[in-house]
Amino acid sequence: MRLAECTLCILLATQVSVTAGLDPRVLDVDKEKSRAKPGSRMTSRDRDTIHNWVSWYASEGPGASGKSKLGLRQPINREPKYFHEPSGPGGGHYDKRYFRRFIEEKQRNQHLKYLIRAWLEWTQKQNIETWLAHGTLLGWWWSSEILPWDSDLDVQVSEATLKNLAETYNMTTWSWAFEDGNVKKDYLLDINPYWTDRQRSSTSNLIDGRWVDKSSGLFIDITGLSETHPDSRPGIVTCKNMHRYHVNEIYPLRPAQFEDYQAYVPYAFDKVLIQEYRSKAFTLTEYDKYQWQPALNTWVKKENLQPRKLVTLRNGKKMKIKEDEPRGLEAVPKPTLMQNLQRLVRYWQ
Ligand SMILES: *[C@@H]1O[C@H](CO)[C@@H](O)[C@H](O)[C@H]1NC(C)=O
């Protein structure tokens, strides 16, 4: 059943133009339409296939170094790697120069909030175009916030913007003062000199730039999109990590709120997210230690949730609900396959 459900969703996703009927001038995006009801559980297999997709893709995906499953030779890492991270599990999320210690999840989330705030404010002040990407975009879709389990952030820029960043702002440090918490931070903008090579020639330099928090080593990855084959594939833009988009999926950018600040997202954000994470990224309401709470419109750590108790509903059915939670929300049964399909069809009409 699960497989059938999934296959149908993908079928729908590929057959139906997801952005049909959307007006580029509509600034308020109704994300509620496709939001899942509580109850869909994520298996460990789902977890691997969806949320870890990006890191899996980089390390073992078809373009990673070594031989692919088909035995084709992949690009050899001839270029020296520009950005360095401390070794060990979790090290990949810190810049080696500024790494001091591993930061626990909640604190890390706060550092990331400051990071993105500063980036969004800085780019707007300098009139630099940028938009949310990958897991950061998915976080926006769910709750306009960084996903609590995320350990780094992703933004994209156009090739022209990347050039401007490299030529005008490389290795510049920007000081930021945040009123909440009376926090002062320095951020370094560092552009990879291999940015000029717009095709993937090595896996060492997939990331074009970083906005680094000098106090913690945490960072935002900046990747540029380029039209690498204007003659044979006009309008197709890619980053060096092989993510491909049609320019019309990116532009015109949609203004959006993220972490209480003005941000931008790709025009066809839904299509972009489905391509990267599949449609399950929109419907699974449990991930890792977290559960989506519709009443609060945010992800909540399961250990902070109240224990559930068994109650008998008016219609005679028994159901486990939480004491303080409005019953309406908690008593929604798991949607059936037909309901899921109807919901998707309605969303894509
Ligand atoms: C940015 O500056 C660093 C340090 O000087 C340098 O190593 C790097 O090549 C520069 N990047 C670009 C794009 O010029």
Image (cartoon, helix red, strand yellow):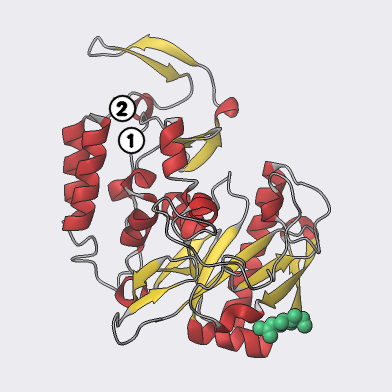
Q: In this view, does 153 lie above or below 311?
A: below
In the rendering, at what x and y percent does residue 83 appear? 70, 67
Q: Which residue is drawn at 38% across and 46% down?
A: 281
Which quadrant is home to the C terminus?
Answer: bottom left
Q: What element carries label 2?
A: loop
Look at mark 1 in the image and give the residue it sits on.
37
Q: Residue sitting at 57 percent across and 84 percent down? A: 196
The mark nearer the N terminus, 1 or 2, is 1
**Image vertical order of residue 275 relative to residue 308, above or below:** below
- Do tag 1 and tag 2 residues touch (Cβ < 8 Å)? yes
Q: Which of 237 and 294 is in front in this view?
A: 237
Figure quarter occupied by ligand 1: bottom right
Residue 290 horizontal/vertical position (percent): 53, 35
Residue at image point 51% right, 58% down? 64
Who's the residue at 42% across and 50% down the image? 69
Residue extending furthest toward the right: 100
In this rendering, is residue 79 above or below 14?
below
